[in-house]
Image (cartoon, rainbow, N blue to C red):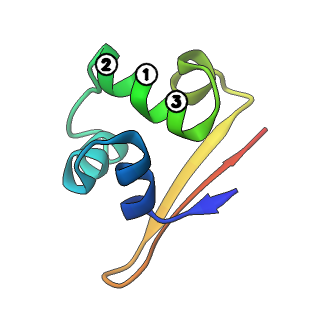
Amino acid sequence: MGISQTKLAKMAKISRPGLSTIENGHKQASLDTAWKIANALNVTVDDAFFNQNVRLVIQGTEHSDKITASS
């Protein structure tokens, strides 16, 4: 699955800069935010943040951000 960082932020109803800071490890997601992200990706919070068999990758450039989830 690949979606833009902007689209995931909209789906999760969080800010794109906030999502970026979580992805970059500059900020930890609150439980509410973690739930919103996991729900938007249709995975559990455990899978989204703790399961080493599920890999979330956010790749971005100035013009394009991509998020992929694979197991």
| Residue holding disc 2 | 32
Q: Secondary structure at mark 3?
A: helix
On the picture, is 61 further left or further right than 27?
Answer: right
- The reply to whether discs 1 and 3 touch (Cβ–Cβ < 8 Å) is yes
Foreground of the two, 50 or 41: 41
| Secondary-structure class at tag 2 | helix
Q: Which residue is mark 1?
A: 35
**Could you give the CA–CA distance between mark 1 and mark 3, rounded to whole angstroms?**
5 Å
Say above or below: 8 vs 54. Answer: below
Q: In the figure, is residue 38 to the left or right of 68? A: left
Mark 2 surroundings: few (<14), some (14-19) or many (≥20) residues within 10 A: few
- The C terminus lies in quadrant: top right
Would you say 24 lies left or right of 70 here? left
Residue at image position (53%, 19%) is 45
- Amino acid type, label 3: Ala
Three-letter code for the amino acid on which mark 1 is drawn? Trp
Residue at figure coordinates x 27%, y 42% from the top left: 14
What residue lies at 42% left-to-right and 79% top-to-bottom?
A: 64
Q: Amino acid at mark 2?
A: Asp
Give the Cα distance between marks 2 and 1.
5 Å
Closer to us: 42 or 69: 42
Labels 2 & 1 near each other (Cβ < 8 A): yes
Task: State the residue at coordinates (43%, 60%).
Answer: 7
- Percent x, y for residue 40? 52, 38
Q: Quadrant of residue 50?
A: top right
Coordinates of residue 43 in the picture (x, y in percent):
64, 28
Residue that carries the numbered disc 3 in the rendered image: 38
